[in-house]
C-alpha cells in the first residue's frame, strides 16, 4: 500500500531512500549522528519506547517514570497509534515488540 499522507515531498523521498541504503546499526549511528542532534535522536527513541509501552498496556505513570516522557508526549504517541499512519505499529511488529499486554521489550 502506497503512503498517501500529507508528508509526501521530494526531499523527504530522498531522505527516506538514503535511510533505506543503510545496512546495519553502525551505519545508522554514523548517518544519524551527522543528520540529527543528540536531542532529536533521543526524542525519537523515547517516542518509540512510549509506543511500545502503550501497546504493552503500561500506564501513563509507568511510561513517564521509565522514559521521562511528558503526559503530552504520551498522549501524542497514543493518538498516532490509534489514528495515525500505522508507522509505529509496523515497526514494533517487525521488531517483535508489539504484543499488547505482554510488558516485555527493552526493560525485560
Image (spheres, rainbow, N blue to C red):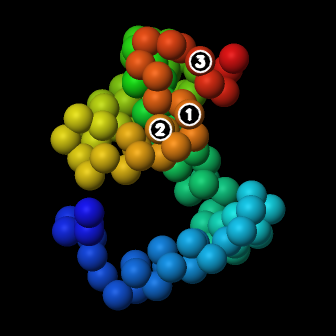
Identify the image quadrant of residue 26. Answer: bottom right
Q: Element type at marker 3?
A: loop
Crowd around label 2: few <14 · some 14–19 · many ≥20 (10 Å): few
Q: Are marks 3 and 2 in contact (CB under 8 Å)?
A: no
Please give the residue where the numbered disc 3 appears in the rendered image: 104
Q: Is residue 85 above or below residue 46?
A: below
Residue 100: in sight, yes or no? yes
Residue at 27 percent across and 76 percent down: it is 8
Determine the secondary structure under disc 1: loop
- Which residue carries the number 1 mark? 96
Q: Quadrant of residue 70?
A: top left
| Image position, residue 36 (x, y; %) | 61, 67
How far apart in space, not on screen, are marks 3 and 2 (Cα)? Answer: 13 Å
Name the residue carrying label 2: 93
Distance CA(mark 3)–CA(mark 1): 10 Å
Q: Quadrant of the N terminus?
A: bottom left
Residue ID at (19%, 68%): 4
Residue at mark 1 to residue at mark 2: CA–CA distance: 5 Å
- Residue found at the very far right of the displayed protein: 26
- Quarter of the image that includes the C terminus: top right
Q: Position of residue 78 (x, y in %)?
A: 30, 32
Q: Earlier in the sequence, mark 3 or mark 1?
A: 1
Residue 37 position within the rendered picture, expressed as x and y whole percent measured from the top left: 63, 63
Comparing labels 3 and 2, the label whose residue is closer to the camera: 2
Residue 78 vertical placement versus 2 (above, below): above
Residue at 56% x, 56% y: name it.
Answer: 40
- Counting labels gives 3
SS of the residue under disc 2: helix
Amino acid at each position: 500500500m502506497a503512503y498517501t499522507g500529507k508528508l509526501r515531498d521530494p526531499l523527504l523521498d530522498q531522505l527516506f531512500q538514503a535511510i533505506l541504503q543503510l545496512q546495519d546499526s553502525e551505519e545508522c549511528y554514523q548517518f544519524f549522528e551527522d543528520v540529527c542532534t543528540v536531542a532529536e535522536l533521543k526524542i525519537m527513541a523515547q517516542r518509540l519506547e512510549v509506543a511500545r509501552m502503550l501497546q504493552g498496556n503500561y500506564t501513563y505513570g509507568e511510561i513517564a517514570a521509565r522514559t521521562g516522557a511528558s503526559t503530552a508526549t504520551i498522549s501524542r504517541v497514543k493518538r498516532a497509534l490509534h489514528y495515525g499512519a500505522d508507522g509505529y505499529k509496523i515497526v514494533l511488529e517487525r521488531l517483535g515488540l508489539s504484543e499488547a499486554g505482554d510488558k516485555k521489550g527493552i526493560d525485560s
